[in-house]
Amino acid sequence: SHHQMDLNYTQNVPMSRGLNLQFQVAVFNVMNSQTGYDYETRISNPSAFIKRADASTSSTPVIDIPNSISDASLQKLLTPGATFVRSDWAVKAPQPKTFYAPRRYQLTARIQF
C-alpha cells in the first residue's frame, strides 16, 4: 500500500485599501515515498525466466513459477525438444514500471482585492 502526506501553510498579510497579500507554501509527498506500481507482466517472455543455478549468482530477485502455468507451455517456451523440470527454473521478480512522484514544493504569492 502507498500513503502520501501533503502539507500546506497559508499566511495572509493585510495591506491598505482592502488589499490582502497572501503567501502559500505547499509540500507534496512530505515523506518522499516513491512506491512503485504498474508492475510489468512478462511471463510469456523467455527472458523473464532464469535457471535456479544462475539465480544464485545473480543480483536479480526470483520467485517460484506460478502453478497456473502448465509444464507443457513452459517446456515449449524454455526447453523445446528437451525435458523440462519445473524445480530447475524460477521467474525473475517483476519490477514496477512507474513510481509515485517524489517530494515537490510549491511557493505562491498573490494579491487579493
Image (tube, rainbow, N blue to C red):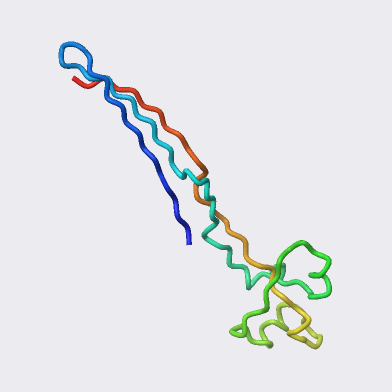
Residue 103 vertical position relative to residue 39 in the rendered view, above or below: above
Q: Quadrant of residue 93?
A: bottom right
Q: Furthest residue to the left?
A: 17
For image coordinates 29% across by 24% down, the residue present is: 22
Residue 81 x, y percent position in the rendering: 80, 85
Residue 11 vertical position relative to residue 55 in the rendered view, above or below: above
For image coordinates 58% across by 59% down, the residue present is: 96
Which residue is nearer to you in this view: 41 or 81? Answer: 41
Q: Quadrant of residue 25?
A: top left
Q: Furthest residue to the top?
A: 16
For image coordinates 73% across by 63% down, the residue present is: 60
Residue 71 vertical position relative to residue 57 in the rendered view, above or below: below
For image coordinates 36% across by 26% down, the residue present is: 108
For the C terminus, give its image quadrant: top left
Residue 39 x, y percent position in the rendering: 56, 62
How many labels, in total? 0
- Does residue 113 appear to the left or right of 42 in the view shown? left
- Does residue 93 appear to the left or right of 12 in the view shown? right
Residue 61 vertical position relative to residue 33 in the rendered view, above or below: below
Which residue is nearer to you in this view: 16 or 55? Answer: 16
Which residue is nearer to you in this view: 20 or 110? Answer: 20
Residue 106 x, y percent position in the rendering: 42, 32
